[in-house]
Amino acid sequence: MVLSSLGSAILCLALAVQALSAPASNESFTFRIPPQRISLKIENQPLTVAASGIISVGARSHDKYILKLKLDADLTDLQQNITKLLSAQLDKDDPCGDHITIEHATLAPVGPSVRSIVQLHYERYTCVKAFGTRMTKRLVGGHGIIQMKFTPAIENRKTLQLRPEVESIQADGALGELLRSGQIGAMVREKISKALLSALQKGTDRSLTLPPAVQDIAMIDKAQFEGEGSGRLAIVLGGEVLISRQQTQLLKDKLKERMPAR
């Protein structure tokens, strides 16, 4: 009788411990962020980024849950208008200085990175006055191709950055030197980096893409460019963070009116 009571007590204790440690799966959920078109301007050039995502919360233990975020930003519009965008920033026609024309530019996914190839024509002139007449002399000129690769990185688990790398510069003679080590080459590389990063940061701005309930909670651990199967450019951000059971319930309550039926 005593042994039977003792056995029952041990069994009840074991079941209680198991219940405390078991994940509360009924509080897990998935919320799909519907596609939305984000309009932005870079150097007065209008662009659109299409963003969508998934938020999922699952139990890690009795009182700890893991919130996972995946955010997908379609950069097709940037990809199709990169020549026009760079032309607006870089084209120049100074009668006594630099002449720059962006002839063609491309963006293409390469693994987790994106590659930019920019073809340009450059000429430099100087002006002198002789006997009251201004004379123009061409100092250097020709065509060049700059190929760069940009790899995404995450700062403070929230901010998207880019790590630029010059892969190659093709140009003859003095123009090649200007593009490799001179001010013109540095300016072109800076403008490409700035245009791409600006579009990425605005297109993945959490205040525009995420529901208010998760804007201060969700974290980003990784980012990579993808080709979406057809060469179309997109960037995918992902991350996860542990939250409490109370945070999970509050988050679910705030999102439930927008959650699709399961």
Image (cartoon, rainbow, N blue to C red):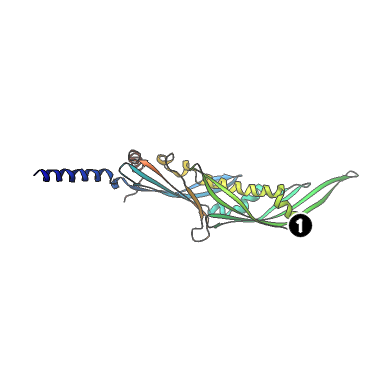
Q: Position of residue 206 (x, y in %)?
A: 47, 42
The reply, left or right, for residue 121 in relation to residue 148 is right
The reply, left or right, for residue 87 in relation to residue 197 is right
**Quarter of the image where one finds residue 8:** top left
Secondary structure under tag 1 reads: helix
Quarter of the rendering occupied by the N terminus: top left
Residue kind at label 1, given as amino acid type? Gly
Q: Furthest residue to the bottom?
A: 230
Q: Which residue appears at 35% of the width and 44% of the height? A: 65
Q: Which residue appears at 10% of the width and 43% of the height? A: 2
Look at the image and tell me whether residue 27 can be seen: yes
Q: Position of residue 235 (x, y in %)?
A: 50, 52
Residue labelled with disc 1 = 173
Q: Position of residue 47 (x, y in %)?
A: 55, 48
| 180 or 40, nearer to the observer | 180
| 51 or 67, nearer to the observer | 67
Q: Which residue appears at 20% of the width and 43% of the height? A: 13
Look at the image and tell me whether residue 39 can be seen: no
